[in-house]
Amino acid sequence: GLRHAAKVHTLALDLAATADPGARVLAALAELPAPSALLLPVGQSRVDDDGSLGAAATGQLLAINLHAPITIVQALLPALLEARGVVVGFGSVAAVRGRSRNMVYAAAKRGLQGFFESLRHRHSGQGLRVQFHRLGFLRSNLTHGMRLPLPAAEPAQVASQVVANLEKASFDRHAPRWWALVAFIIAHLPWFVFRRMDA
């Protein structure tokens, strides 16, 4: 708002503690013009997500990374279809293969990827553009201090690419784009090689 003199409306929402996030978002938009775009850069991971989380922590990760984005898309879908708009989801390269860490997070992101593919399939030819970005490492508080095997992208750079693609047709791609080659290699490694990786 300060930088671009834009009118900004905010809604504080705990996605893990809200039964129907979609309804809350829809109610917050009631007095505003109908939306023509929905971007959902939603996600949370935990360092202790190693298959031993309890039910509450598992439910929290699933709520934030899978349930909330789906319910928000479903709530805004009629308006987005009418506007022939765009809905943008964000996955993770963590979902390429089952890993020994970030297990629930990766499973949720793989589920979200499947939902967006189904969304694109169901509404093909209806004017709705469905875009899905599978994100690689980002330079953020989540990766700060970590020794990463590959370079971390700047969030502002990725955000600029996302915005630049909003008017384009539906797609499912990696961001940055070179992650597609890395993901292809990981996906096709023999199991006996992959399971020896610290992933």
Image (spheres, rainbow, N blue to C red):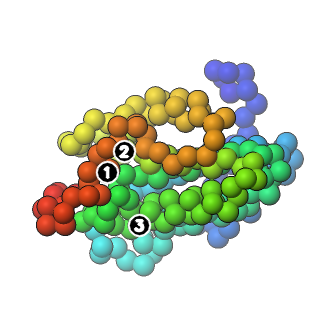
Side (left or right) of 55 relative to 130: left
Instruction: Count residues near mark 3 (Cα–Cα under 10 Å), then give few for <14, some for 14-19, many for 20+.
Output: many
Side (left or right) of 100 relative to 114: left
The answer to whether residue 139 shows anywhere in this view is no
Which amino acid lies under the numbered mark 1 shown in the image of this protein?
A: Phe
Q: Is residue 71 above or below residue 159?
A: below
Q: Quadrant of the C terminus?
A: bottom left
Side (left or right) of 137 relative to 41: left
- Give me the residue at 27% from left, 64% from top: 99
Q: Pick the residue in front: 126 or 155.
A: 126
Q: Quadrant of the N terminus?
A: top right
Q: Which mark is residue 107?
A: 3
Q: Earlier in the sequence, mark 1 or mark 3?
A: 3
> Residue 12: percent from the left, percent from the top?
64, 50
Callout 1: helix, strand or loop? helix
User: Label 2: which residue?
Assistant: 180
Question: Residue 51's image quarter?
Answer: bottom left
> Residue 198: percent from the left, percent from the top?
17, 57
Instruction: Count residues near mark 2 (Cα–Cα under 10 Å), then give few for <14, some for 14-19, many for 20+.
Output: some
- Give me the residue at 35% from left, 37% from top: 178
Instruction: Count residues near mark 1 (Cα–Cα under 10 Å), then give few for <14, some for 14-19, many for 20+.
Output: few
Which amino acid lies under the numbered mark 2 shown in the image of this protein?
A: Ala
Q: Earlier in the sequence, mark 2 or mark 3?
A: 3
Which amino acid lies under the numbered mark 3 shown in the image of this protein?
A: Ala
For the residues marked 1 and 2, what is the alpha-carbon distance in whole angstroms?
6 Å
For the residues marked 1 and 3, what is the alpha-carbon distance in whole angstroms?
18 Å
> Residue 21: percent from the left, percent from the top?
66, 62
> Residue 71: percent from the left, percent from the top?
66, 64
For the residues marked 2 and 3, what is the alpha-carbon distance in whole angstroms?
19 Å
Query: Do labels 1 and 2 touch, CB within 8 Å?
Result: yes
User: Label 1: which residue?
Assistant: 184
